[in-house]
Amino acid sequence: MNADQALQDDAPPQQEPRDFEHPIVVHGLRNAFGDHVIHDDLSLEVRKGEILGVVGGSGTGKSVLMRSIIGLQQPSAGDVCVLGQNMTEKADDDEIDIRSRWGVLFQGGALFSTLTVGENVEVPLKQFYPGMSESLRSEVARFKVRLSGLPDEASFKYPSELSGGMRKRAGLARALALDPELLFLDEPTAGLDPIGAAAFDELTRELKETLGLTVFLITHDLDTLYAICDRVAVLADKKVIAVGTIPELLALDHPWIQEYFNGPRGRAADTSRARQAEHALPAGSANGGNKTGEVNEAGA
Ligand SMILES: Nc1ncnc2c1ncn2[C@@H]1O[C@H](COP(=O)(O)OP(=O)(O)OP(=O)(O)O)[C@@H](O)[C@H]1O
């Protein structure tokens, strides 16, 4: 199959009014800084309940895409629709409503260093639920801290007193503060040791399954892609050039995709995932394969 065959559909987004089969729909996106064009006619649809991995070389605009989706980057053209809300046409009230329906873990965690972990988690609660009592707010924050796999006492620590992995979990606790439907993770396992990264992947998968989250996950981590992503979107040439499961992407002849997944690191990640799958399954039932399906040429 040709990479061109997996290009996004040119049709304008058909956003369902209430059920949001695709809670994120991006169509014809253009972003530029001066004459540096980052995205040109980029389209992407994220399915409800999936973990979508977003990959691409450094500087291809993964973080700018995420910022465009959450309204922190005003695109020069195109439409971004999140949970039925057109992000380029929203009124102030709409913006407040929609921002309470997603959580974001930025690269580095972006925690306030002068606040404890618990107080950090309370920040969005104070902002969106100003009438909530102090004791309930503190209780909710402590629950989110535990939900993120941190011990209760971490709520009372400052970010500087935590390890890198714990800071990521604290950032995740804050992202979960408002019971979001969508979770945006920007390189969540960067800087973690392999065991910490695998534990964070497992936590992401568990949270997605138990809370019914849709996850937009930017990563360079091949292990994460193999372990938890339902589909992967590839950014190159200012666009999303393909979206699909890893086997579907491997069937494309795009050189970057081939080098990325079939290079030494990609093969190692695949082998390691296959070994883990074999150990996890009863004897004789392991087939070492990934989930398969069709590359959706509309990116959906
Ligand atoms: N506010 C800004 N002003 C000017 N240029 C910017 C701005 N934000 C991002 N860029 C540029 O946009 C390009 C894409 O940046 P972005 O951070 O989205 O890349 P990325 O794919 O996430 O990279 P990485 O994988 O290295 O994190 C880069 O060339 C970056 O320098």
Image: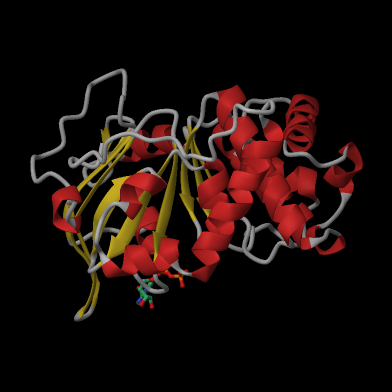
Q: How is the image coloured?
A: secondary structure
**Residue most toward the top?**
18
Of the pair 13 and 7, the residue shown nearer to us: 7
- Residue 77 position in % (x across, y down): 15, 57
Q: Ligand 1 shows up in which quadrant of the image?
A: bottom left
Residue 26 drawn above or below residue 188: above
Residue 230 drawn above or below residue 133: below
Q: Quadrant of the C terminus?
A: top left
- Residue 165 position in % (x across, y down): 75, 56
Q: Quadrant of residue 111?
A: bottom right
Write the residue at 42% across / 73% down. Answer: 58
Of the pair 79 and 4, the residue shown nearer to us: 4
- Residue 246 position in % (x across, y down): 40, 48
**Residue most toward the right?**
153
Write the residue at 17% across / 56% down. Answer: 2
Residue 122 drawn above or below residue 284: below
- Residue 296 position in % (x across, y down): 23, 38
Write the residue at 43% across / 63% down. Answer: 262
Q: Quadrant of residue 155?
A: top right
